[in-house]
Image (tube, helix red, strand yellow):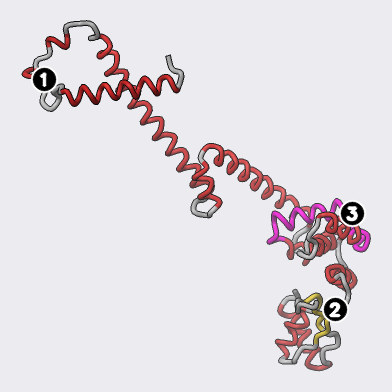
């Protein structure tokens, strides 16, 4: 788009001379050429004139108009070319590749340059118009896009790892309920809590079970006297039944985990 002064100058020309070139639309009403003329007509208060493109390749038409009208650097041409090739009408990769080759010849830029522009288009789309306008070079934009691509690849790798370790948290990241950083913080907290619980459980069993094993075959049970039991810790039949059940559950888990 033109800047405000240039748009106003165009609007003044349209007021004085009329709209010399119509705005070109595709059959769906999308503007192929003439966004500046449309805005200038609006500023001038003039009813814009339109024509409908009747060809079968609107993307190539738009590209040709842009390349013919401007004095562009190779980087600008490559960016315009990449943007044209990314048109939603190119549903198949082979068609897009053919278009890229055609655009490369038409724009006089290498496929490598168009490839760099494609990386910018995908990973730094906010720089596309700056490259086309000449405010940012294709090399600088490509460097920024590469850095963002590396970050995106790292994020994808972290998400894949999170999906393996904790699918629930990964699903919440995908659903935008959690950031990836927040999910990993929660994952860390879960791991630390799991370690704490395992440490407490291990210490408890190591304190209780060896002592119980030592009284096997002794007169300890015969010598038990409720009068000497600590308050609230008397041994009852119910506690013995619960302890028996706990030992059976423990034996089953030890067998399942193949522990000695």
Disc number for residue 229:
1
Disc number for residue 53:
2
Q: Nearer the viewer, residue 224 or 137?
A: 224
* Farthest residue, direction left: 227
Q: Are dots 1 and 3 in contact, CB under 8 Å?
A: no
**Label 1: which secondary element:** loop
Identity of the residue drawn at 52% across and 42% down: 167
Badge nearest the viewer, 1 or 3: 1
Identity of the residue drawn at 36% across and 31% down: 197
**For residue 186, what is the image quadrant?**
top left
Q: Quadrant of the C terminus?
A: top left
- Is 109 inside the magenta-drawn segment? yes
Q: Are dots 2 and 1 in contact, CB under 8 Å?
A: no
Residue 249 image offset from top left, x and y in percent: 34, 24
- Residue that carries the numbered disc 3 in the rendered image: 110
**For residue 64, what is the image quadrant?**
bottom right
**Label 3: which secondary element:** loop
């Amino acid at each position: 788009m033109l800047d405000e002064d240039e748009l106003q100058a165009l609007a003044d020309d349209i007021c004085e001379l009329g709209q010399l070139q119509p705005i070109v639309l595709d059959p769906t009403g999308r503007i192929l050429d003439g966004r500046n003329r449309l805005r200038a007509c609006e500023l001038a208060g003039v009813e814009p004139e339109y024509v409908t493109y009747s060809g079968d390749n609107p993307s190539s038409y738009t590209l040709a108009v842009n390349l013919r009208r401007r004095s562009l650097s190779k980087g600008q041409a490559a960016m315009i070319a990449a943007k044209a090739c990314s048109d939603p009408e190119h549903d198949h990769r082979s068609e897009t590749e053919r278009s890229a080759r055609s655009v490369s010849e038409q724009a006089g830029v290498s496929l490598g340059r168009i490839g760099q522009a494609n990386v910018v288009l995908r990973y730094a789309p906010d720089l596309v118009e700056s490259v086309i306008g000449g405010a940012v070079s294709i090399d600088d934009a490509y460097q920024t896009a590469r850095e963002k691509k590396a970050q995106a690849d790292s994020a994808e790798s972290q998400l894949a790892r999170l999906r393996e370790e904790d699918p629930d948290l990964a699903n919440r990241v995908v659903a935008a309920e959690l950031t990836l950083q927040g999910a990993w913080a929660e994952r860390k907290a879960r791991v630390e809590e799991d370690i704490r619980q395992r440490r407490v459980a291990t210490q408890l069993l190591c304190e209780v079970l060896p002592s119980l094993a030592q009284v096997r075959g002794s007169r300890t049970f015969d010598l038990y006297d409720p009068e000497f039991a600590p308050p609230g810790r008397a041994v009852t039949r119910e506690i013995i039944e619960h302890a028996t059940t706990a030992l059976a559950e423990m034996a089953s888990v030890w067998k399942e985990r193949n522990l000695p």
